[in-house]
Structures are given as structure tokens and as C-alpha cells.
Image (cartoon, grey):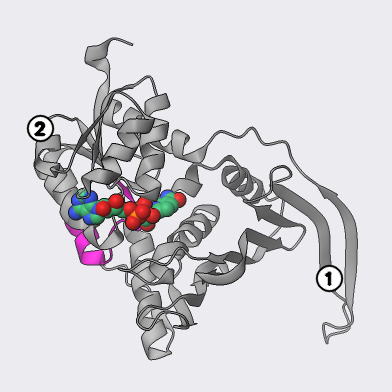
Amino acid sequence: MQESLRQRIAVVGCGYWGAKHVRVLRQLPEVGEIIAVDSDLERCNVLVDSFPHVGATSSFEDALDEVDGVVVATPPTSHAKLALRAMEAGKHVLVEKPLTVHADEALQLMEAADESGVTLMVGHTFEYNAAVRYLRDFIAAGEMGRVFYIDSARLNLGMYRSDVNVLWDLAPHDISIANYLLGRAPSAVQAWGGRHAHHALEDVAYMRLIYDDLDVTANIRVSWLDPCKVRRMTVVGSTRMAVYDDLASEERVRVYDKGVTATENGLGVPMSYRYGGISSPYIEFEEPLLVQNRHFLECMTTGTSPLSGADDGLAVVRVLEAAQHSLTTGQTAEVNDAA
Ligand SMILES: NC(=O)c1ccc[n+]([C@@H]2O[C@H](COP(=O)([O-])OP(=O)(O)OC[C@H]3O[C@@H](n4cnc5c(N)ncnc54)[C@H](O)[C@@H]3O)[C@@H](O)[C@H]2O)c1
């Protein structure tokens, strides 16, 4: 590709996840120059050693002069300020999840993107995951019957963050997947959790997302304090059930031809059980972060609205705000969708 047509990208925040952004951006022919930006220059230098031809600076302002787009991969509480500054400078922006830590900030970013006419996208990586896309199409085609409920577990030992609790760190993934599978956001949320090894931040949390109009609930468990790494989602439908295990090297999605039917005695019991086969579809897999970042570049160039746009990011932030409220008050919280 002609150098002049290539996009120049700054990755701001070169820690665990920013380093992965740099790695995948280097694989994309649409990308020209990459600048690694981190307030800790040592972090950038580690990347420059691994990836020659990547530039490095600790000055976000200097980098802004040199690029067309910015990936914000800093801690969540800093997302809004950096994304806003980048858009003020006329740059396209991909912000890591969660888009912001307040709905007001997300709305401010959306306004800024409109005013500057730039792409604003959120890194809901799982919406670019072939297994999740398969599940969504499977549900939409009616193959599972009516979805009864979703159950999701995202557990591991660490990594503890210092600016947000485990809900804001891990649950954005489960919420964005549930919204994506069901095609809408929940109307209410219940959440509870505990601070165990950390004095100020919840390190274990449970949420129930209530999709009132669908009569579906999504139950989510997230933990930084579990001996086993688990990334598993179960979707239970009236005719089939499916398990998506993101850690499985093969058979990432398994479909269980199982179900129950209430017998017609007026009491609903005893239930009749149907035990069928288990199948696993072949799913062509490409690294979701690569798919996501390629999509960002396409949106930057063509002006197409991103699949995971700022409205998606805002929807997840609103659920998290409601969950945080529920966690504090012990009450069910409505998800505020006022503009
Ligand atoms: N999509 C995913 O699957 C996924 C996975 C992991 C993390 N993330 C997200 O990526 C972001 C970064 O997470 P991480 O685990 O890499 O964190 P990290 O702590 O490993 O790295 C953050 C980096 O940002 C730098 N930084 C902080 N403030 C800065 C500023 N104002 N300007 C420049 N640099 C700054 C820090 O020095 C650090 O190097 C978070 O928003 C997190 O939620 C997304």
C-alpha cells in the first residue's frame, strides 16, 4: 500500500493491553507509522526493542501532531480526558473498555466526535470474536428457541487494578457480549460483591442484568480473587443450550441439544427431560483485537459507523453505573437511558 494512504496511529498507554495493540497494528498493511506513548517512557522503550520502527514518546501532545488516529489504552479513569483532547485535535479515536467511568463523560465524548467529524469507537473486543458472532447468529436464527437466561463467569487471580473495581474492569466484556447477543441493553440491574484482599475496591462481584421486555436475565460473576482462570458463558434456550468457553483451544462453542418441558398436569411438575447430542461448529478464528483494529482503520478511512460505536460504549457505562449504585445501596437499579 502507498505510504501516503497509510494511517499513522498513536497508542497511548503501553502497558499490558497497549502492547497488544501495537503488536496487531504492526500486522496491518493499512497502518504506516506507529507511535507508542506512555507517561512512563520505559514502557515505550520495551516496545521499541521488540518492534523496530515503532516511535516512542512520553508526550501525548507531541504525538498528536504526528498521527491520524489514537488508541487510548490507559487506565479507565483517564480515558475521557485523553480521548477528548485527541478529538479536539481532529484525531479519530479508539478507546479501550470501559469507554469512560461516568455516563456524562461518554456523552461529552459523543458530542465532541460529532463536532469534529471523527470516528469514536470503543474496544469491546468480544464483539469482534468469531465465537460470539456465531452465538449471536445462532440465537437470531431461532436455533435455541426462546432464550431463558445467560450465565457468565470471568474469574482469575488478578490482575488487580488501582483505579476501578472488578465490576468496571471485567464486567464490560460480559455486558457488551450480553447486549450484543440479545440486541439491546437491560432495563435494570442488581449487583452485589465484596472487598476481600483489597480494602477499597470490590474484588469479587455478581450482577444480574434484567432484560425486562425479553423476559431474559444475564447473570454475571467477575473475580480477581479466584484460583482458576475461567472465561465461560452459557446461554440456555427453550430448545437448545450453548456453552462458549473462551479458553478452549478447540470446540470453543458447544451446542447441547437438551431441554426440559413442563408436563401438562397444571402444576408444571414432574418435568420431562430431553437429552440430545452435543455438537461443536467449526468457527474460523482470527484474533479479535486484530479484527477490531482493522475495523477501526476502515471506519477512519471510509467514515463508516463502527460496529462498537460510542453509543455501545455508553450503554455499557450506564449498566455499570447502575450496577455500582445497586452494589452500594443493595437495591435494584434502573438503567438510566436518558440522553
Ligand atoms: N479489551 C480487552 O480485552 C482489554 C484487556 C485488558 C485491558 N483492557 C483495557 O486497556 C486499558 C489498559 O489496561 P492495562 O491492563 O494495559 O493497564 P496497565 O496498567 O498495564 O497499562 C496502562 C499504561 O498506561 C500508562 N498511562 C497511565 N496514564 C497515562 C497517561 N495519562 N498518559 C500516558 N500513559 C499513561 C501507564 O504508565 C501504563 O503503562 C484499560 O482501559 C483496560 O480496561 C482491555
Q: Nearer the viewer, residue 49 or 38?
A: 49
Q: Judge whether 190 appears above or below 209 on screen.
A: below
Residue 79 visible in the current orientation: yes
Identify the amino acid type marked 2: Asp
Tell me where residue 215 appears, x and y as whole percent: 58, 71
Quadrant where the C terminus sits is bottom left
Residue count near mark 2 (Cα–Cα under 10 Å), binned few <14, some 14–19, many ≥20: few
Q: Name the residue carrying label 2.
A: 65
Residue count near mark 1 (Cα–Cα under 10 Å), binned few <14, some 14–19, many ≥20: some
Identify the amino acid type marked 1: Thr
Q: Nearer the viewer, residue 235 or 292?
A: 292
Image point 10% across, 37% down: which residue? 62
Image point 45% across, 63% down: which residue? 159
Image point 90% across, 61% down: which residue? 275
> Which element is circle 1 on?
strand
In-image side of 3 versus 170 (left or right): left
Q: Which residues are magenta?
A: 95-109
Q: Name the residue carrying label 1.
A: 261
Q: Nearer the viewer, mark 1 or mark 2?
A: 2
Q: Earlier in the sequence, mark 1 or mark 2?
A: 2
Q: Nearer the viewer, residue 218 or 13?
A: 13
Q: Judge whether 293 appears above or below 327 on screen.
A: above
Q: Judge whether 77 appears above or below 32 on screen.
A: below
